[in-house]
Amino acid sequence: MARIADAMLPASQVRVAEPHGQVAGFACLQGDRLDHLYVTPAAQGRGIGTALRGQAKEARSRVLDLHVFQQNTGARRFCERHGFALVEEPPFASSPRPVTLRWARSARPSATTG
C-alpha cells in the first residue's frame, strides 16, 4: 500500500472514506480525470462510491473523465447512473481494454423575462 501511495499521492488529489475509523474506499483525481475509485467489497452498496464520486464531481468545474474496463459492466452501469456517458470505446473487445466515460456539468439555464 505504501508503494501505491508514494506513486499516486504526489500527483493526485486523494479523498479517503473512513466511516467508523476504518478505510472503506478512496478516490484519486489527476486534473480532470478520476484515476482511481475503489471501495472495499465489505463497504460496497452503502453509498461510499457515490459519495466519493460526488466529491470528485464537485471538485471539477466542468468535466470529469474516467476509464472503466469494457468487461466491468457493473462499474459502467454505476457510472452511467451517475451521469457519465461513453466517450471512447476501443474497436476490439477480445481483451480487457478501458473505455472512457465523461461527466459534464450542465449549463445552468438563464433567467428569461417575459
Image (cartoon, grey):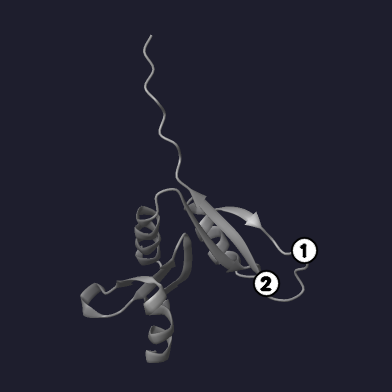
Q: Position of residue 96 (x, y in %)?
A: 68, 75
Residue in the picture at 63% in, 54% down: 87
Tags 2 and 1 touching, CB below 8 Å: no
Q: Of the residues shown, which amino acid type is indicated by label 1?
A: Pro
Mark 1 neighbour class, 10 Å CA radius: few under 14, some 14 to 19, many 20 or more? few
Kind of element beneath mark 2: loop
Name the residue tied to disc 1: 91
The N terminus lies in which quarter of the figure? bottom left
Q: Of the residues shown, which amino acid type is indicated by label 2?
A: Arg
Q: Which mark is residue 2?
A: none
Q: In the current view of this chain or complex, which residue is farthest to the top?
A: 114
The C terminus lies in which quarter of the figure? top left
Residue 36 lies left or right of residue 85; in this view the side is left
Residue in the picture at 39% in, 86% down: 6
Residue 69 visible here: yes
Name the residue tied to disc 2: 97
Q: In the current view of this chain or complex, which residue is farthest to the left?
A: 20
Q: Earlier in the sequence, mark 2 or mark 1?
A: 1
- Residue 45 placement: quadrant: bottom left
Residue in the picture at 40% in, 65% down: 49
Q: Position of residue 11 (x, y in %)?
A: 41, 74
